Image (cartoon, rainbow, N blue to C red):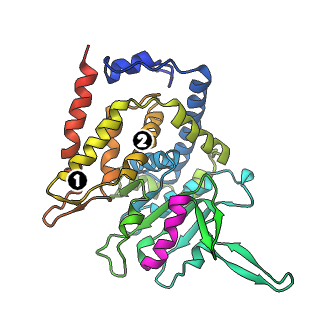
């Protein structure tokens, strides 16, 4: 039997998350309608991305969650795994008929060792006729920015992205220039064992909501990629409908306002962070910023699952991607994700026990 997303009311959610939890008021019809509309927009965008990139459904979902949560994503794998295609497909899926102040829906920045910060943010150019300086924006001024091979440039240039990702603005000659509200960064990097790469500084890593390691796709998916030849995958995806800037911003607002997040998840996140910080294998734990960024991500995943409430499975699925790049572990500890899962297990057990209470 097929159910309509967001048709359930909060009493059902209270039963799923624990009958002892305070029951929130039933959502208004307008709020449910906004969630249904947001779900439709994101589903349309997901279908288009899947047409462009085969065998990456999990990665596509994480990228969409980050987009809805107003975060940024770091993709890591060896060249040729589809990272750039995925980012370009997302940018191309945004309808450019509603751009703001001439902003492009998508821009790509190729990071190289000789790149300068001004090549990213822009610079002031002297206008001879007016005898004044005029700001020429760089490629960072776009809705979706692909920072390709971000670890192939110097730390100074990497830092140029820091203000943009954290504050959605860039400062040139003591003047701040705001970026668009939709501003979203997909950064790609090659593993550090490849020559000519630089490790990203910890403050910049903390600005990425997720770090996603893209493994090789399944055999069937690779056969589908080859079967598309000679028509490019981006061309196939372009035949499907995209989304507008206004629809994406509306979806962000609907997620934050309409998806119920029980207070017990606040406690679970804080206790998880404290457990990671006190774990002897962890040299540096996660920041409070990471916990704040996780909240809308949990709501976004619930939306993609057709729910108007956050469930324990959302925390279990997202926690490894949120914390894996924020933790510094000691020598001899190779699997950071395993450390996260071990520290998360007691919190999931507590959530499960509460959901079983009568």
Question: How far across and down, in percent of the image, does residue 322 sit?
Answer: 35, 51
In percent of the image, x 51 and y 20: which residue is there? 7
- Which residue in the structure is indicated by mark 2? 295
Count of number-bearing discs: 2
| Mark closest to the chain's N terminus, 1 or 2 | 1
- Most extreme residue toward the front, as rendered? 174
Q: Pointer 1: what residue? A: 277
Q: Secondary structure at mark 1?
A: helix
Residue occupying the point 31% across, 41% down: 269
Q: What residue is at 55 percent from the left and 40 percent from the top? A: 42
Q: Position of residue 40 (x, y in %)?
A: 58, 34
Asked if one can make out residue 1 in the rendered structure from this viewpoint, the answer is no
What segment carries the magenta color? 154-167
Rendering quarter of residue 201: bottom left
- The reply to whether the magenta stretch includes residue 87 is no
Residue 166 part of the magenta-drawn span: yes
- Evaluate if marks 1 and 2 touch, with contact meaning CB atoms under 8 Å apart: no
């Amino acid at each position: 039997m097929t159910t309509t997303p967001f048709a359930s009311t909060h009493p059902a959610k209270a039963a799923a998350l624990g009958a002892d939890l305070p029951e929130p008021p039933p959502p208004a019809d307008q709020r449910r309608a906004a969630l249904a509309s947001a779900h439709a927009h994101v589903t349309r965008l997901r279908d288009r991305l899947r047409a462009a990139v085969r065998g990456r459904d999990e990665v596509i979902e994480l990228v969409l969650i980050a987009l809805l949560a107003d975060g940024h994503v770091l993709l890591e794998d060896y060249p040729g795994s589809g990272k750039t295609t995925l980012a370009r497909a997302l940018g191309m899926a945004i309808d450019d008929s509603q751009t703001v102040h001439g902003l492009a829906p998508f821009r790509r920045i190729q990071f190289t060792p000789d790149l300068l910060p001004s090549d990213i943010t822009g610079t002031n150019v002297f206008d001879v006729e007016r005898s004044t300086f005029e700001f020429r924006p760089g490629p960072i001024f776009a809705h979706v920015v692909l920072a390709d091979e971000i670890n192939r440039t110097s730390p100074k240039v990497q830092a140029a992205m820091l203000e943009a990702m954290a504050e959605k603005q860039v400062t040139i000659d003591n003047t701040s220039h705001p970026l668009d509200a939709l501003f979203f960064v997909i950064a790609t990097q090659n593993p550090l064992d490849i020559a000519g790469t630089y490790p990203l500084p910890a403050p910049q890593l903390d600005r990425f909501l997720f770090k996603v390691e893209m493994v090789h796709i399944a055999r069937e998916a690779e056969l589908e990629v080859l079967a598309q030849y000679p028509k490019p995958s981006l061309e196939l995806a372009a035949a499907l409908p995209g989304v507008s800037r206004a629809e994406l911003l509306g979806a962000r607002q609907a997620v934050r306002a309409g998806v119920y997040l029980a207070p017990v998840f606040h406690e679970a996140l804080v206790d998880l962070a404290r457990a990671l910080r006190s774990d002897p294998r962890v040299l540096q734990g996660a920041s409070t910023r990471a916990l704040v960024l996780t909240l809308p991500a949990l709501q976004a995943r619930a939306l993609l699952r057709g729910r108007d409430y956050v469930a324990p499975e959302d925390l279990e699925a997202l926690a490894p991607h949120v914390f894996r790049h924020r933790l510094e572990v000691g020598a001899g500890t190779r699997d950071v994700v395993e450390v996260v899962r071990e520290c998360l297990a007691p919190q999931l057990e507590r959530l499960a026990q509460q959901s079983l209470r009568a």
